[in-house]
């Protein structure tokens, strides 16, 4: 077993930039590793927690067995109410997109997950910082995906009455 090397505190900003670059290069495992190194030195670093959460959920679409428990644990470490609501929406939206790729069976669950994401975005919208419409943009994306794919609630799909 190897003893991992510890990142210096001064290197945290540059390491976080590298983690974001790896995410954008579609290499979430590398971004995840960097974030874990940052969090070892700065356990409450919100940027590292968000980047790690995004790297973990990037893996949903790759078919990896990524646990919702891990994502939920990271959400709990976010200190802001807006951030918790917004990123909870991101997690649900990414799970929905993954389900959508699974075909008919998955699309039955995708609708519920997209609606869960939209509810989170609505919570975030109410407490968003001035000039930050990210939650609105994500909500609109979910609505368009539901419409484009003609997704319906499970109750409708199964021929059972839908309840409000």
Image: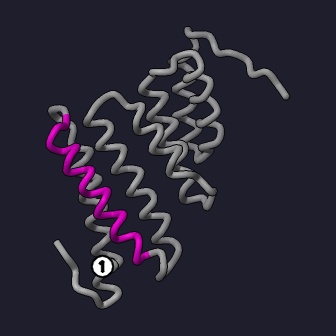
Determine whether, in the image, residue 155 is placed left or right of residue 34: left
- Image quarter where the C terminus lies is bottom left
Q: Position of residue 8 (x, y in %)?
A: 62, 10
The reply to whether residue 33 is visible in this rendering is yes
Q: Residue at x 31, y 71 (%)?
A: 146
Determine whether, in the image, residue 115 is placed left or right of residue 73: left
Question: In this rendering, is residue 148 above or below 10?
Answer: below
Q: Quadrant of residue 114?
A: bottom left
Determine whether, in the image, residue 15 is placed left or right of residue 132: right
Mark 1 = which residue? 152
Determine whether, in the image, residue 81 is placed left or right of residue 164: right
Q: Position of residue 156 (x, y in %)?
A: 28, 84
Q: Quadrant of residue 117?
A: bottom left
Q: Residue at x 35, y 87 (%)?
A: 158
**95 vs 21, nearest the viewer:** 95
Q: Position of residue 157 (x, y in %)?
A: 34, 85
Whether residue 98 is in magenta: the answer is no
Question: In this rendering, is residue 138 above or below 98?
Answer: above
| Bounds of the magenta segment | 107-128
**17 vs 97, nearest the viewer:** 97
């Amino acid at each position: 077993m190897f003893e991992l090397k510890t990142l210096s505190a001064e290197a945290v900003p540059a390491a976080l930039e590298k983690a974001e670059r790896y995410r954008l290069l579609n290499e979430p495992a590398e971004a995840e590793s960097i974030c874990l190194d940052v969090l070892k030195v700065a356990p409450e670093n919100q940027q590292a927690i968000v980047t790690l959460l995004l790297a973990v959920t990037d893996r949903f679409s790759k078919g990896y067995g990524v646990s919702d428990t891990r994502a939920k644990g990271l959400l709990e470490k976010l200190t802001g109410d807006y951030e918790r609501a917004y990123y909870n929406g991101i997690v649900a939206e990414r799970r929905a997109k993954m389900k959508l790729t699974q075909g008919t069976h998955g699309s039955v669950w995708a609708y519920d997950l997209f609606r869960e994401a939209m509810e989170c975005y609505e919570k975030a919208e109410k407490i968003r910082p001035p000039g930050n419409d990210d939650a609105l943009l994500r909500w609109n994306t979910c609505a368009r995906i539901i419409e484009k794919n003609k997704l319906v609630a499970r109750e409708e799909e199964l021929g059972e009455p839908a309840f409000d």
